[in-house]
Amino acid sequence: MNLKFGQPDNSVIQLAYVVADIEAAIHHYNRHMAVGPWQLRGPFTTTSAVYRGQPVALSLSIAHAFAGHTMIELIQQHDQLPSVYTDTIVRTGYGFHHWGVSCPDFDARLEALGNEGKAPVFEDKTAIGTRVAYVDFRDSLGGFIEYIEMTEAAEARYTAMYARALTWDKADLIVRL
């Protein structure tokens, strides 16, 4: 089954990158790849994030835009607290971070991964309450996989972003949330 924004459910819906300067990155993606419009949230502080079993209040900015049916996510961490983001920056520098995979049955997916010995290293909730969990596949795939709980609210949010990209008049590159 395809989600309303065109990607198959239970598949990659997002490519994500850690960046040093989120607004500069937005302009770079637009100038060189015509990606936009971008929805930018932040800086904000996480309130439910857990990294390697410990609560962490990260200062982040996150931007989303669609390139075709695929969402691009840019992430800037404004502090130096331990996280999946700073871990990647220290290990390989800025750039590719994770694939986002839609999960209509989030709990079952995490249970299955746990049975394979793949526990989440980072968990959080999005601004609309959608749960996410990052599993480390850097050694085998070159990045994390973020499992995204695909609720009706999440699908509606992503579909609205996709629709804005289809009708974007190139006037407003950044929409601040």
Image (tube, grey):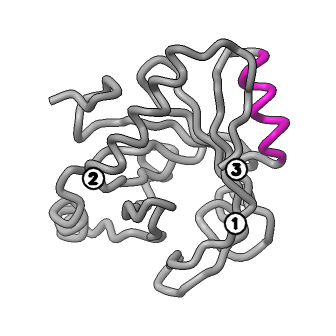
Whether residue 94 is visible: yes
Along the polypeptide, which appears first: circle 1 or circle 3?
Answer: 1
Per the image, the residue denoted by label 3 is 92
Q: How many marks?
A: 3
Against 56, residue 123 (above or below) is: above
Indicate the position of residue 157 as horizontal and vertical percent values. Answer: 42, 42
State which region is magenta.
21-31
Q: Secondary structure at mark 3?
A: helix
Q: Tell me if residue 154 is in the magenta stretch.
A: no
- x, y (%) of residue 94? 74, 46
Q: Residues within 10 Å of mark 1 (few under 14, many from 20)?
A: some
Identify the residue under disc 1.
44
Q: Position of residue 100 (x, y in %)?
A: 42, 45
| Location of residue 83 with respect to 151 vertically, above or below | below
Specify the amino acid type for callout 1. Answer: Phe
Magenta run includes residue 27:
yes
Q: Residues within 10 Å of mark 2 (few under 14, many from 20)?
A: some
User: Eyeballing the image, is 74 above or below 79?
Assistant: above
Q: Which numbered disc, 1 or 2, marks the residue that appears first in the sequence?
A: 1
**Which residue: 46% across, 85% down?**
53
- The quadrant the N terminus occupies is top left
If you read the primary sequence from the N terminus, does the residue marked by circle 3 or circle 2 appear first? Answer: 3
Q: CA distance from mark 3 to mark 2?
A: 33 Å
Give left or right: position of 11 versus 168: left
Q: Do the CB atoms of the residues marked 3 and 2 lie less than 8 Å apart?
A: no
Q: Identify the element where label 2 is drawn.
A: loop
Q: Position of residue 44 (x, y in %)?
A: 70, 66
The residue where tag 2 is placed is 151
Residue drawn at point x = 65 percent, y = 12 percent: 169
Q: Could you tell me how far apart the alpha carbons at marks 1 and 2 are, in whole angstroms?
A: 23 Å
